[in-house]
Image (cartoon, helix red, strand yellow):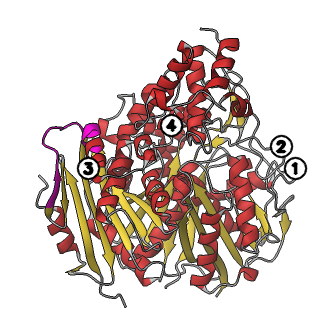
């Protein structure tokens, strides 16, 4: 597991107040929304803020989020390709 | 339940200083929504209905010192001033004030121009009540975007309970950096003026307004008047920031309202919808109206004229609804092009005359709240 | 004519203590800090509801108070929510405004309306009932009483949960009570003040 994956899990737990979760409880390919981690629409908006704040990525089309935020793997891939910081 | 009358009213918005000025602007298909480039939250600018402070100060200087009151306080005071002057039954001793706002003087949060307690909604209400030397403690309703109509319901309930002999309901909100940045963080702000119920809608536009109405058990003038029948609220119990896909809360509020009041849905001549122009809201409303068998009833949203005026919106729209009943006119749903909701509604495309008697006003808001209210015209 | 109504149950939360029907129910001697108090109280109640941690402190206060008042389950789905406070959600307004400078936070902004608490309680207990949120300088029993009576008289409910849930500068004052057609204590302003006042300085 890359540092980026762990870093993402840590900041998701912190930013989205997943108080009762640990880093090792989130699988890399686990669905973040729906049945998996059960995140909701406000979490999605907060993840958009996280991308901008931590990685300098500004999502202009909110619909892009659906694919990017599918799992930790998809998020990490997208960040690797698009990060400006 | 007694049925109180909706009497003198006032709307202050970019479309006019009085209700009749506002109506004239609407009949001329004017909109308050203009492009503004003064916000760091919008590189390309944003559309909103903003009220010019100099204009308000010049109006206010005739009745008080503009430096002593915040912009929102001045707007609400100016609106109240219009509705109490000519009312014979208004009394500083026994009349109530019910105030509707979501964020009040939130623009004072990082600003020391006024005493620190002005940020409290109760304090703002007290400042306004003191301006008119009202003896009754003002009541403040802050329940997201249904506040304006919920304040009307509260005034009627408190007249019935004997707390007030009659009441002024007033409301207002500003387009502050606070709400602009918040709605932007929700990615809810449209890059064009908002287009309620249209297939090309892409979110809300915000607007500033203040409104006031005088509600009394007695009808002050001869001729036709509009009275409040009843209002019902219902929570969606679905999500704090979005409506349920089935429109359950709004549907519940409408169907319980019909049950409670004994009014048959077929008697509704016109619906003033919430119509914020977000994807989810408009879709949810169309589903609720359809479930309540109201999809054929002429319906509009006033948001295309004003934007979403938050704590003022349902009050302002109730006043316009009252005027439509009295004038027997249906006003076009501004910026409507082609239907963009899954259930076809009878959206009013152009202004027209129609005999009207009974109207339904609805509103929905964050926290899952929904409200439905019935108004009816009667002749004496 | 208005019917006879009763105060069925009550909960007070103040100063790291919870009182149920006048008796001390929970006390946290170690944590004057509200966020730790709210976390400890949640743990002690053995609730499993991960959304709790996403709420702002104001909503947490109303939510957990309701859990205690109803023992975790509001059976009567008609139960109307009549709430109020003095400071609206000023505390969260301040937190949100700090994020405005750089990256406005949507998850904070959503809590900058006091009635969000009613949404949280309604979602938890699947209530599609009447809602209202009042703002007043001080606890005003007459507002709650008159509005609740109207709901009963107009046939809009047969049970009401009233809540004064105020939070200012980390100081909180929570008073929740259930109004029903049966119970031990007659509902009137005096009784409400009697329950509200004793531990309040």
Nearer mark to the viewer, of 1 and 3? 3
Query: How far apart are the alpha carbons under marks 1 and 2?
Result: 8 Å
Q: Tell which circle, 1 or 2, labels the residue nearer the N-terminal end.
A: 2
The disc placed on residue B337 is 1
Along the line of sight, the residue nearer the viewer: C155 or C29 = C29
Along the line of sight, the residue nearer the viewer: B11 or C55 = C55
State the extent of the magenta-drawn residues as a range.
Answer: C24-38
Nearer mark to the viewer, of 1 and 4? 4
Residue under the image location 45 percent in, 46 percent down = C51
* Mark 2 neighbour density, 10 Å: few (under 14) some (14–19) many (20 or more): some
Dot 1 and dot 2 residues touching (CB under 8 Å): yes
Dot 2 corresponds to which residue?
B200
Dot 3 corresponds to which residue?
C44
Dot 4 corresponds to which residue?
C107
Query: How far apart are the alpha carbons under marks 4 and 3?
Result: 26 Å
Magenta span contains residue C29: yes
Q: Is residue B93 visible?
A: no
Q: Tell which circle, 4 or 3, labels the residue nearer the N-terminal end.
A: 3
Q: From the viewer's perspective, is B98 left or right of A33? A: left
């Amino acid at each position: 597991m890359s540092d980026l994956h762990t870093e993402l899990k840590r900041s998701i737990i912190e930013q989205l107040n997943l108080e009762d979760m640990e880093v090792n409880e989130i699988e890399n390919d686990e669905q973040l929304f729906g049945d998996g981690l059960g995140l909701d629409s406000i979490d999605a908006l907060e993840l958009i803020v996280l991308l901008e704040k931590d990685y300098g990525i500004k999502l202009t089309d909110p619909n892009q989020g659906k694919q990017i935020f599918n799992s930790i793997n998809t998020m990490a891939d997208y960040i690797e390709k698009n990060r400006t910081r | 339940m007694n049925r109180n009358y909706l009497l003198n009213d006032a709307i202050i918005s970019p479309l006019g200083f009085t209700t009749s000025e506002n109506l004239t602007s609407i009949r001329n298909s004017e909109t308050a929504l203009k492009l503004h480039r003064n916000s760091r939250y919008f590189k390309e600018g944003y559309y909103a209905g903003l009220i010019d402070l100099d204009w308000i100060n010049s109006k206010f200087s005739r009745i008080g010192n503009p430096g002593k009151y915040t912009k929102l306080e001045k707007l609400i005071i100016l609106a109240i001033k219009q509705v109490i002057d000519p009312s014979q039954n208004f009394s500083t001793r026994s009349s109530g004030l019910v105030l509707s706002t979501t964020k009040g003087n939130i623009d004072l949060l990082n600003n020391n121009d006024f005493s620190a307690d002005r940020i409290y909604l109760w304090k703002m209400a007290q400042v306004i009540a003191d301006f008119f030397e009202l003896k009754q403690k003002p009541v403040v309703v802050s329940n997201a975007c249904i506040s304006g109509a919920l304040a009307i319901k509260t005034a009627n309930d408190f007249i019935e309970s004997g707390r007030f002999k009659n009441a002024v309901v007033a409301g207002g909100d500003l387009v502050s950096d606070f709400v602009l940045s918040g709605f932007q963080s929700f990615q809810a702000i449209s890059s064009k003026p908002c287009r309620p119920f249209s297939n090309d809608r892409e979110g809300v536009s915000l607007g500033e307004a203040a409104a006031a109405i005088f509600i009394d058990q007695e009808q002050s003038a001869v001729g036709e008047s509009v009275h409040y029948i009843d209002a019902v609220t219902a929570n969606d119990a679905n999500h704090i920031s979005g409506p349920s896909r089935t429109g359950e809360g709004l549907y519940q509020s409408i169907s319980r309202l019909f049950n409670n009041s004994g009014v048959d849905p077929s008697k509704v001549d016109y619906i003033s919808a919430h119509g914020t122009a977000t994807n989810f809201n408009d879709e949810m409303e169309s589903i609720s109206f359809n479930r309540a068998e109201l999809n054929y009833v002429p319906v509009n949203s006033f948001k295309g004229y004003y934007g979403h005026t938050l704590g003022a919106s349902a009050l302002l729209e109730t006043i316009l609804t009252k005027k439509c009943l009295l004038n027997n006119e249906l006003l076009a749903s501004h910026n409507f092009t082609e239907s963009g909701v899954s259930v076809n509604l009878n959206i009013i495309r152009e202004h027209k005359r129609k005999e009207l008697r009974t109207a339904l006003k609805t509103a929905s808001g964050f926290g899952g709240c929904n409200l439905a209210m019935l108004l009816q015209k009667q002749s004496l | 004519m208005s019917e006879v109504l009763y105060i069925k149950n009550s909960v007070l939360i103040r100063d790291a203590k919870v009182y149920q029907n006048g008796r001390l129910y929970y006390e946290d001697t170690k944590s004057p800090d509200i966020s730790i108090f709210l976390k400890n109280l949640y743990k002690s109640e053995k609730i499993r509801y991960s959304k709790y941690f996403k709420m702002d402190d104001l909503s947490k206060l109303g939510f957990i108070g309701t859990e205690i008042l109803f023992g975790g389950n509001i059976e009567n789905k008609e139960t109307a929510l009549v709430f109020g406070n003095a400071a609206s959600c000023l505390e969260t307004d301040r937190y949100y405004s700090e994020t405005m400078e750089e990256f406005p936070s949507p998850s904070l902004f959503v809590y900058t309306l006091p009635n969000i608490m009613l949404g949280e309680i309604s979602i938890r207990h699947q209530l599609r009932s009447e809602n209202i949120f009042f703002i007043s300088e001080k606890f005003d029993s007459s507002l709650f009483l008159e509005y609740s009576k109207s709901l009963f008289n107009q046939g809009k409910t047969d049970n009401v949960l009233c809540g004064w849930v105020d939070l200012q500068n980390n100081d909180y004052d929570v008073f929740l009570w259930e109004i029903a057609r049966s119970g031990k204590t007659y509902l009137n302003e005096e009784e409400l003040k009697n329950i509200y006042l004793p531990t309040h300085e």
